[in-house]
Image (tube, helix red, strand yellow):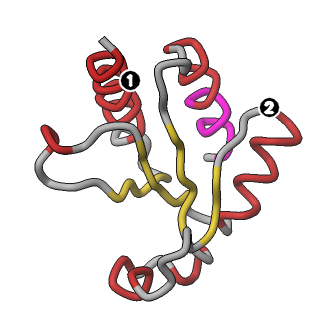
């Protein structure tokens, strides 16, 4: 049940983020192997600025930066964003919380 919940949330958030032209999502091609973590950047913002805005203005916690893997970011070509914004999903994450995140990110457009 936990896997199914996290998989549903992953697919839901990916679907929403991929419709937002100001957001670039870093996602594996094989969607069946993707669950629980989503990384992205927002055009016009550094990743830590997005994290601070989400935290201070919306009370949403995300991780930002190079996530202990600095060398992969030259491959991802996200250096100008100073890394990515990373959302971690769990059995305790609700769809309503993701809707709040989506609404907040729409305001950054």
Residue 81 included in the magenta stretch of the image: no
* Residue at numbered disc 1: 9
Q: Position of residue 36 (x, y in %)?
A: 39, 38
Report the residue at 47% width, 78% height from top: 69
Relative height, residue 74 to residue 46 (above, below): below
Say which label, 2 or 1, has the lower sequence index. Answer: 1
What is the chief secondary structure element of the magenta stretch? helix
The N terminus: image quadrant: top left
Spatial separation of the CA atoms under disc 2 and disc 1: 20 Å
Report the residue at 65% width, 46% height from top: 62
Q: Position of residue 38 (x, y in %)?
A: 42, 47
**What element does badge 1 sit on?**
helix
Query: Splitting the image into 4 quarters, where does residue 76 fall?
Result: bottom left
**What element does badge 2 sit on?**
helix
Q: Which residues lie in the magenta part?
A: 102-108
Relative height, residue 25 to residue 8 (above, below): below
Q: Position of residue 10 (x, y in %)?
A: 35, 31
Q: Nearer the viewer, mark 2 or mark 1?
A: 1
Residue 58 tag number: 2
In this picture, residue 21 sits left or right of residue 44: left
| Count of number-bearing discs | 2
Residue 106 included in the magenta stretch of the image: yes
Report the residue at 61% width, 30% height from top: 101
Query: Splitting the image into 4 quarters, where does residue 2 fall?
Result: top left
Relative height, residue 36 to residue 52 (above, below): above
Q: Position of residue 14 (x, y in %)?
A: 34, 37
How many residues crowd around disc 2 within 10 Å: few (fewer than 14), some, or many (20 or more)? few
């Amino acid at each position: 049940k936990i896997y199914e919940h996290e998989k549903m949330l992953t697919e839901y958030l990916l679907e929403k983020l991929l419709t937002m032209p100001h957001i670039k999502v870093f996602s594996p091609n094989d969607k069946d192997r993707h669950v629980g973590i989503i990384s992205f950047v927002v055009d016009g913002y550094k990743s830590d600025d997005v994290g601070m805005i989400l935290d201070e203005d919306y009370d949403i916690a995300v991780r930002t930066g190079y996530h202990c893997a600095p060398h992969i970011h030259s491959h991802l070509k996200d250096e100008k964003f100073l890394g990515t914004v990373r959302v971690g999903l769990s059995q305790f994450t609700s769809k309503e919380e993701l809707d709040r995140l989506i609404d907040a990110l729409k305001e950054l457009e």
